[in-house]
Image (tube, rainbow, N blue to C red):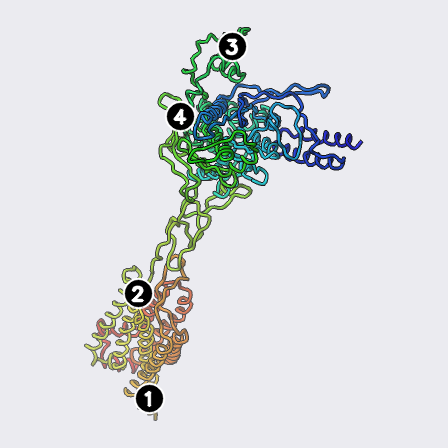
Amino acid sequence: MEMEIAAVEIGLALAVCLFHLNSAVAFAVCLDGMRQMTRHIGAQAGTSTSSLNCKLQGSTRLPAFSKDGDFVIGGDFSLHVYMNTVYSDYTSMPEPAKCKGSLFTSELQSSRAMVFAIEEINNSTELLPGIRLGYQIYDSCGSVPVAVHMAFQFLNSFDPVFSMDNNCSHSGMVMAVVGGSGSTESISLSKVIRSFNIPQVSHFSTCACLSDKQQYPHFFRTIPSDQFQAEAMAKLVKHFGWTWIGAVRSDSDYGNNGMASFLKAAQKEGICVEYSLSFHRTYPHSRIQKVADVIRRSTAMVVVALLSLGDMRALLEELSHQHSPPRQWIGSESWVTNPELTRFSFCAGAIGFGIPKSRIPGLRDFLLNLSPSQVASSQILTEFWEDAFNCTLTKNATAKKKVCDGNEDIQNLQNQYTDTSQLRVTNMVYKAVYAVAHAIHNAVCQEINGTAKCDKLTKLESKQILIELKKVNFSRNGYDVSFDANGDPVAIYELVNWQKSEKGATDMVTVGLYDASRPVGQEFQIDKNITWMEGSMKVPVSVCTDSCPPGTRKVLQKGKPICCYDCTACPEGEISNSTDSTDCLPCQKEFWPNAKRDTCIPKPVEYLSFQDLLGIILATFSVLGACLTIVIAAVFFCHRKTPIVRANNSELSFLLLISLALCFLCSLTFIGAPSEWSCMLRHTAFGITFVLCISCVLGKTIVVLMAFKSTLPGSNVMKWFGPPQQRMTVVSFTFLQVLICTAWIVVSPPFPIKNLTTYKEKIILECALGSAAGFWAVLGYLGILAAFCFVLAVLARKLPDNFNEAKLITFSMLIFCTVWITFIPAYVSSPGKFTVVVEIFAILASSFGLIMCIFAPKCFIILFKPEKNSKKYLMNKNQS
């Protein structure tokens, strides 16, 4: 009863496994689980798993090519790429699955190359002397179910029953397997044969997942892993500046794992993918049509295709049905070196990675040496012959084909089978066979006196071959063969470009090399004579957004990949000096961006110079004011004995004229580049000269007031305001300002600075006050004197003095005070060099106010009204 339950459980597990036949990984996991279940149930039933026998369901498959030998090597090749669909009603045994479709001639060449390599080894006196290798080469049809079925036949040859004993030893077991032709088949095959320690050396399985020694400890390959190819493709795309691409892949272990590796590498390189689509040639036509439509409508000019040959052929055929915009194809080694696809002219310019070309001496002669009997005895060769020459070898020929008459000349046949000019994948098969042969040699042969002695009677287990395969390291035809810890070879690719020839044909031209063993950044060696899509010699552009020029930065568009962005000008004061900059860099304090904002240039230095228009105007007025003062002084000196000069305190008048001349000239110290001396001089000279000026005006005002007081009976006040006292007053007031200025200079003098804050885009050279208290003390003292003088002048404005000097002083002080009161807010609010302009204007305005109000009327009388400049006129005026 327990055994019946166990049988039911195993049957259910097997049904679940068969349901997963389309997925290599799922089937393999299921198979492992079934194996453990078998052991567990056997233990529960009190039986040993060694007593359980497995029977292969269905008929055995015959190999495409086979030969007996001392040690047999298995071969797995996808000679066809389609398998007929078998429908079962579960009432009778279904018909065995059969391959269909056209014969894959490149795979036929690879399988025949395996035969050639084995025959070459059998004829060698150095490698495995005295031992004959056999082979069993099967057609897997590129199908997982067939690959699994074939794997069991590798374990037990044509015997439909084998025992699941602990030793896993079977008389028909192959020593190693060369293949398969695709990653999916290799995964299925490896999961089955690994339990029996049979090593597998693939020539065309590139999935990076197969490098995982935890899952595939018995897997080796002579072709590089897709991990290397994915990184190389990402670097190639980046090398040509393509940041916006489309991606299509086979919906298989090869395509899905390879594309995952590529997308990860592309992300590191800053490449964005507009779309990533998958399909399989066996999918409904609508699915393939949808993929073609996406490619046609996309904005990406570059398409990365990680497709098997059959899937790529199906896609290109669909694209050829309608006119498609030009696209730059980036191909994987699975299709980019296959001449069959060059018939699709719209793919001209495609570029991709291929296995390096090689040559195998004697292979072409072997391939073409097909006798009629040899062809007739092989179903595969018969199919090849009939397809190649469009005839049939059978007597009952159909009306569509003629009977082959024996005149067919394979020497003149031009197809992938006979073409040995670019042996790429075929050489991978050749190296795989030799790797297995070297492993067998090392296991059964010994070097005695420099000669290899081999014992073909040695009981050789596949596990020994596995151990020796890890150690192989040899050269054949100039090509090194070895495996790293993951069972992978050194990754070397040729960069292949599809170029239009003068005759209009598309040729595959090697335009570079990629060697993963070279230092980082030096892996590529790319020629310049690459032809792009539509025969252009110019590298196509494929970006989501045009590059942002220097002076701008990238701003990502919301909800879109990082390659889609807007170009925004750098903010004020910042630059970007590279294309596609993500950030703008601020300039240093004394630098400012140029108009394009792509470089920092020194800020222009600004100050009130003698070359500026304002500087020229102010300097001109300063000189004119000084000259006018000198002219007035000369006039007064020439008429110093006239009543109008003597009546107005000639000594103070001359001192006032001298101080006014100095006031005009001190404004010149404010023009020009500030220096330490000019900064100290301009403020102190201004403060002292103006105090001297106001002191003189104050002295004149006091004299007017005291002169009126002295006319009163009994007044003796004028003796206290004579010339000595007037001089002492002027000196005292001026000396106090000198003390203030001296203290200012000693404690914290004015100094030149570069003003970087008023204007961001330029530097203002100006004088810092040093001590603000010192500056305002100078101005305050000057203001107090001016206010006091103004008050006295107002009080004396109606006094009957000679020539109304009191009124003139009043007007002059009114102008003076008005100018300097308005100066304060204007000075504080004026930016940059205009602060200096305001200060100079205040000096000139107040100086001109004094000279025009006090001295201009007197000069007018002296020069143009001399009759009024007489004692008689003065007496009459006083009497009146």
Q: Can you identify the residue that label 4 sits on?
A: 361
Q: Residues within 10 Å of mark 4 (few under 14, many from 20)?
A: few
Q: CA distance from mark 4 to mark 1?
A: 139 Å
The residue shown at (65%, 27%) is 162
Q: CA distance from mark 3 to mark 2?
A: 107 Å
Q: Quadrant of the N terminus?
A: top right
Image position of 265 (left or right of 24)? left
Determine the secondary structure under disc 3.
loop
Q: Which tag, 4 or 1, sits closer to the chain's start?
A: 4
Q: Can you identify the residue that label 1 sits on?
A: 710
Q: Can you identify the residue that label 3 sits on?
A: 393
Hey, what amino acid is under mark 2?
Ala
Image position of 271 (left or right of 694)? right
Q: Residues within 10 Å of mark 2 (few under 14, many from 20)?
A: some
Q: Which tag, 3 or 2, sits closer to the chain's start?
A: 3
| Location of residue 10 in the rendering, given as x and y in whole percent from the top left corner | 72, 31
